[in-house]
Image (tube, rainbow, N blue to C red):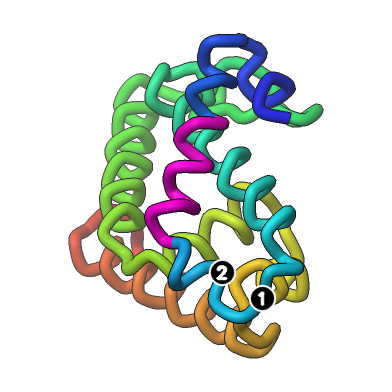
Amino acid sequence: MALAVTRNRAWAEDAVQDGFTRIWQGRERYLRGAPERVAALIVVAVKCSALNILRREKRFAHEPLDGHTFELADASAAPADIAESKDTLGRLRVMVSQMDEVNRAVFEMKCLLGMSDRQISLTLGITPNAVATRCHRMRKVLRDKLTEEGYIDG
């Protein structure tokens, strides 16, 4: 699966290693009382690691991923608009990286991987309502901060 995401054997190997390392380091929290969800957790961790590698290598915006093409800006946009869009995206990435681990995992699974609330709840061991509540609160916090800092209009 990591190879399908990265399309690069070395990066895929790094993603698998990083995913397993993250699970091992957080094993007490992630695997507490729910050994049946280990397989799903491994898949999510490896896929998230693969996506992080793509971002790090600045390939995320240029290549199709799982049949979708991600673009940072409209080709007809003015250079100033493109720069502003990249600034906002960069600030958003910093804000997401500063979230606590559970909120960041929920955000990545929901927004990047497109997982359902139920899938996320089974993976993290929280209720679907808790997932929905966390998503709602995180979006509000992110929107408020971006508005306050002048990245978006309120």
Q: Is residue 14 magenta?
A: no
Looking at the image, residue 118 lies above or below residue 47: below
81 versus 79 height, above or below: below
Image quarter of residue 9: top right
Q: How far from the left and from the top, in percent, is residue 106?
A: 54, 66
Q: Amino acid at mark 2?
A: Leu
Residue at 59%, 20% in the rendered image: 12
Q: Residue furthest left?
A: 149
Q: Residues within 10 Å of mark 2 (few under 14, many from 20)?
A: some
Q: Position of residue 44 (x, y in %)?
A: 64, 50
Q: Is residue 48 above or below residue 1?
A: below
User: What is the CA distance from the residue labelled 1 to the residue labelled 2?
Assistant: 6 Å
Residue under label 1, please give it: 34
**Residue 19 counted in the magenta span:** yes
Give the residue pinned by disc 2: 31
Across and down, in percent, residue 91 comes to: 27, 47
Quadrant of the frame with the C terminus: bottom left
Residue 35 seen anywhere in this rendered image of the structure: yes
Q: Residue at the spot x=80%, y=28% of the render?
A: 67
Q: Quadrant of the N terminus?
A: top right
Pinpoint residue 144: horizontal percent, then vertical percent: 32, 73
Q: Residue at x 59, y 39 (%)?
A: 46
Circle 1/circle 2 CB separation < 8 Å: yes
For mark 1, does the 10 Å Cα neighbourhood hold few (<14), some (14 to 19), or many (20 or more) residues? few
Residue kind at label 1, given as amino acid type: Ala
Task: Please report the bounds of the magenta region as a residue range.
Answer: 16-26
Magenta stretch secondary structure, dominant: helix
